[in-house]
Amino acid sequence: MSVRTSHRGRLLLTLTTALTSVVAVASPAAADPGAASVAPLTAAFDTAAVRYDVPRDLLVALGYAESRLDPRAGTASTSGGYGLMHLAANRTLDEAVTLTRLGPGVLRTEPAANVLGAAAVLRSYADQAGLTATARDDVNLWYAPVVRYGGASDPSVARLYADTVYDLLRVGFAATRGEAVAGRPVAPRRGALERAAVLGGVGTLSTDYGPAAWAPASTSNYTVASRPGSHPVDRVVIHLAQGSYAGTVSWFQNPAAQASAHYTVRSSDGAVTQSVREKDIAWHAGNWTYNTQSIGIEHEGYVDNPAWFTDAMYRGSAALTRSLTTRYGIPRDRAHIIGHVEVPGATHTDPGPNWNWTYYLQLVNGITGIGSGTVTTSASTLNVRSGPGASYPVVGSVADGATVSVYCQAVGSTVTGPYGTTSVWDRIGTNRYVSDAYLLTGYDGYIPNVPRC
């Protein structure tokens, strides 16, 4: 056995011991009988940050921006990235192989190795940017390495990518996989990108849909056309990107992608970016006839992780689809607003079983109200559950007397509380429900113009 092989074996043993599995927990506020099961992910970030002298919270924020820290069992994103740190094939993955001396299979599939590979690549970029040991202590000086890690060639997309990571550091976040980062003041040193327009901000806006930013796809990834005259637009196709917002927009600008969609919607706030003009044919459906006669909308996130399916994303996307159906005379029903999986010959499964078609179609059809209510409970707090029923896991709590927003209402298990006996459950956030029996909304049961879940 060579010295190099021996080193690789010892390092892999350390990594797999540090992170043998990643088990999701519902919320930091939830009961956590499996606390030990999330410790390996914490250990993986600790180890990688120390080994390569990378700010730990920056590394966590980067992973959260890419995947919500979801390892995805080693499957590639649409843009060819792997693992919770989205190591990109033919780029950061190859660099991580060289820097860590771990095999590509391990880096793709082992979460601890994936984190270590990302840290190695970031440190390499920092060295090439001239960051000294002292400079590496200042998280604000890592902006250029983060930009390079994202791989975007367009300045506005590059800034969007890095700003997303630094915004997470500024605001703070708690992941469903046991990691939390407290917010702190940040002032990233953007260098030349300080003057770059920010998508959704001051940058160029879409001429087709006013609220959208404009970031054109590579001309290698769509067909110039003159729709709807040459091809009637009669459908909207809903996709899930299997990747991040900035990464998806950037991928459409890569000539090698051979794919595009007209629009992409962000999970956190429902922001929209257009990449292909509506008159042109995006390559999104995998079926030429459907490509020619439809508008494709990508959504940030992953099919098997419902944490990405926020009310903001549903509402931002539904507003876009409502505009499209109005302008092209498309019926607002499931025969004309379809998922990628429903396209004949499709090999994709998106948007998947976690996409709430009932809620979405109501929003598209103008049922867009958001209710509110005051929590009333004899205890100090009321349990919040992941679904509309007492059998769903507890994912947090709300205090007695707290005011909450109600995004939609669902039928679930019957509960008796201060406001009677009811089977109505109120969704107060993404996968967060409380019984209507404990919520004073001003209505008996259903709230007018609030969608059903």
Image (spheres, rainbow, N blue to C red):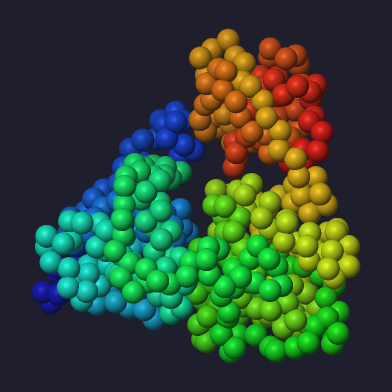
Where is residue 433? Give x, y as percent. 63, 32
Is 371 placed left or right of 42 in the picture? right
Q: Which quarter of the rendered picture does the N terminus lie within?
A: bottom left
Name which quarter of the figure residue 134 lies in.
bottom left
What residue is at 71 percent from the left and 38 percent from the top?
370
Q: Give whichever of 430, 144 is nearer the camera.
A: 144
344 shown above or below 24 = below
Where is residue 117? Give x, y as percent. 29, 66
Where is residue 101? Give x, y as percent. 22, 73
Q: Give whichever of 246, 111 is nearer the camera.
A: 246
What residue is at 88 percent from the left and 62 percent from the top?
331
Where is residue 233? Give x, y as percent. 83, 76
Q: How many marks?
A: 0
Q: Which quarter of the rendered picture does the C terminus lie within?
A: top right
What residue is at 39 percent from the left and 64 percent from the top?
162
Is 219 placed left or right of 135 in the picture? right
332 shown above or below 94 = above
Name which quarter of the figure residue 132 lies in.
bottom left
Q: Give whichever of 155, 6 is nearer the camera.
A: 155
425 shown above or below 401 = below
Name which quarter of the figure residue 275 lies in.
bottom right
What residue is at 51 percent from the left and 30 percent from the top?
396
Residue 163 appears in view: yes
Is 276 placed left or right of 189 in the picture? right
Is 147 placed left or right of 347 in the picture? left
Residue 391 appears in view: no
